[in-house]
Image (cartoon, rainbow, N blue to C red):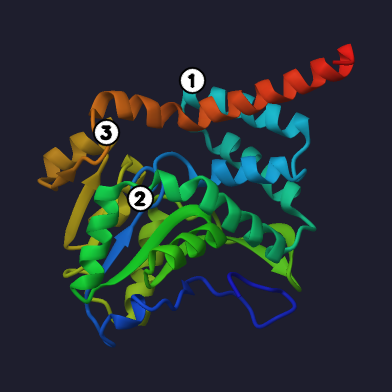
Amino acid sequence: MVGPDVGGTGPVLAATVETPRAALVPEGTRVAAFFDVDNTIIRGASAFHLAVGLYRRDFFRKRDILVFAWQQARYRAFGEDREQIDEVRSRALAIMRGHSVAEVTAIAEDVYDEVLSLRIYPGTRALLDAHLAAGHAVWLVTATPVEIGELIARRLGTSGALGTIAEHDRGYYTGRLVGDLLHGEAKASAVRGLAEREGYDLALCHAYGDSTNDVPILSTVGNPCAINPDRRLRRHAAEAGWPVREFRGRRRQARRGANAASLAGLVWAGAVVVRAVRRRLTGR
C-alpha cells in the first residue's frame, strides 16, 4: 500500500520497493543517497507527463487542461504563490477523487514506458548505479505523487521512494492529501525520519537536487551535490562549496528548455483542445 487507506491500517509515509538490485545493499548500511526526481533524474516534470496520460484517458475535462495551462503560465510569469499552489493542488485532488489507485498506477506504467524512460539523464543514472554498486541505499525523494516515485524507483532498482501522498479509501482516491506536498523543508524532514528509522548516518549520506527548493535536503546530509542546478541553487552551491554536476549538455539552452518544459507541454495540450473544439464546430 502506498499511502493510507482509511479502510486499512493507516498511513505509510515511506514506501519501500524491493528490487533485485536493492536487495544487494548490505543489511544495516549506514550510507544512503537521496535523489530528487524532476530535472535531476528525469528531464522535465514527471507529474506533467502523467497528467497528459490521464487526459488522453478522459480523466481531465478540456476545461481542466486549459485552466492548468493558465495557472502554469501565471506561475512562470509571477513566481510561486502559496494560494496558487493550494488552488492547483485542490483542483488536481478533486479530479482524482473516485478513481482507483490500480487504474492510475497502470496508466503511470504506460507513461513510464512511453515517455519517462526516454527522458532519464544517463549521467544521473550512472551516478545512481554507482551508489548501488558501492552498497549504498538509494532513495528517490519527490514532490510528485508517491505512486510515480515508487514506479520510477522500482524501474531503476532503488531501495524506495518518498513522495506526496494522496489518501485513498479501499483502493479509491478520496480527494484529500495526507500531510502536505513533499516540498522544500518537508523533504528534509521526511529524509531525517527515514534515516532515523533505517539507521542511516546523515553525515555519511549523499543528496542530489536541481532546484533552490532542494537546499533543505541538500543541507541535511554530509555530501550534497547540485545536479543540473537552476541559477539560485548554482549560486548557493558556489557559496557553500558544494560540487555541481551538469548532465544536460549545453547548459543555458537546456535550462531554458527545462524551465519551459511543463508550460510548453500544457500550451500544447491546450492547443490540441482548441483544435478539437474547432473541428467539432466546423464539422471537419
Q: Nearer the viewer, residue 140 or 167?
A: 140
How far apart are labels 2 and 3 at the CA level? 19 Å
Residue under label 2: 41
Which quadrant of the view contains residue 39?
top left
**SS at badge 2:** loop
Q: Are marks 2 and 3 in contact (CB under 8 Å)?
A: no
Q: x and y percent of residue 179 in the render?
A: 57, 61
Q: Residues within 10 Å of mark 1 (few under 14, many from 20)?
A: few
Asked if residue 283 lies left or right of residue 6, the reply is right
Lower sequence index among marks 1 and 2: 2
Q: CA distance from mark 1 to mark 2?
A: 26 Å
- Camera-side residue of 151 and 31: 151
For numbered disc 3, what is the local secondary structure? helix
Q: Amino acid at mark 2?
A: Ile
Rendering quarter of residue 3? bottom right
Disc on res. 232:
3
Amino acid type, callout 3: Arg
Q: As drawn, which residue projects farthest toward the front? A: 284
Which residue position is annotated with label 1?
Answer: 77
Taking 34 as reference, is 99 left or right?
A: right
Q: Tell me how far mark 1 sits from mark 3, CA to CA.
A: 17 Å
* Mark 1 touches mark 2? (CB < 8 Å): no
Is residue 177 visible from the viewing direction of this image? no
